[in-house]
Amino acid sequence: MTYKLNHELGKIVSPIELLFPDGSSREYANGAEALAEEFDERYVISSISAKENKIVISLEAATVPSIDFDGDEVLMFE
């Protein structure tokens, strides 16, 4: 299964740099180019900033809550 980023990124016309949780990064000419990329993992945006004429978007891995067999979210007590 592959995933795409939030479609609202397609509205950004400035160069974009995506920072991934593993420390790697990728640069794109604009949001539409970044939006065309497909990823093997699901990411959510953790922060957006501007640096050296680029929009820098930090990503983090999306977490999926555990669901029990009834379809309810499992609560964990420590």
Image (tube, rainbow, N blue to C red):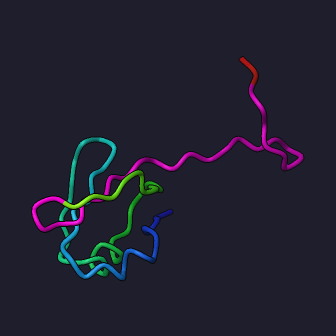
Q: Does residue 70 sit above or below 53 in this rendering? A: above
Quarter of the rendering occupied by the C terminus: top right
In this picture, residue 8 sits left or right of residue 34? right
Count of all numbered marks drawn on residues in the image:
0
Q: Residue 36: horizontal and vertical position, in percent? A: 34, 77
What residue is at 18 percent from the left and 65 percent from the top?
27
Q: Nearer the viewer, residue 46 or 64?
A: 46
Q: Is residue 75 left or right of residue 12?
A: right
Q: Nearer the viewer, residue 76 or 39?
A: 76
Q: Residue at x 22, y 61 (%)?
A: 50
**Up-down relation of residue 57 to residue 35 (above or below):** above
Q: Write down the quadrant of residue 38 in the picture.
A: bottom left
Residue located 47% across and 56% down the image? 42
Q: Would you place residue 48 above or below residue 76 in this image?
A: below
Residue 35, x across and y down, in percent: 36, 75
Residue 60 within the magenta-colored segment of the rendering? yes
Hey, which residue is sitting farthest top in the picture? Answer: 78
* The residue positioned farthest toward the right in the image shown: 70
Q: Quadrant of residue 67?
A: top right
69 horizontally vs 38: left or right: right
The prevailing secondary structure element of the residues shown in magenta is loop
Residue 53 drawn in magenta: yes
Can you give x and y, in whole percent of width and height, for residue 22 in the image?
Answer: 29, 41
Q: Position of residue 48 (x, y in %)?
A: 33, 58
Residue beneath the point at 12% across and 68% down: 53
Relative side of 46 to 30, left or right: right
Magenta extent: 51-76
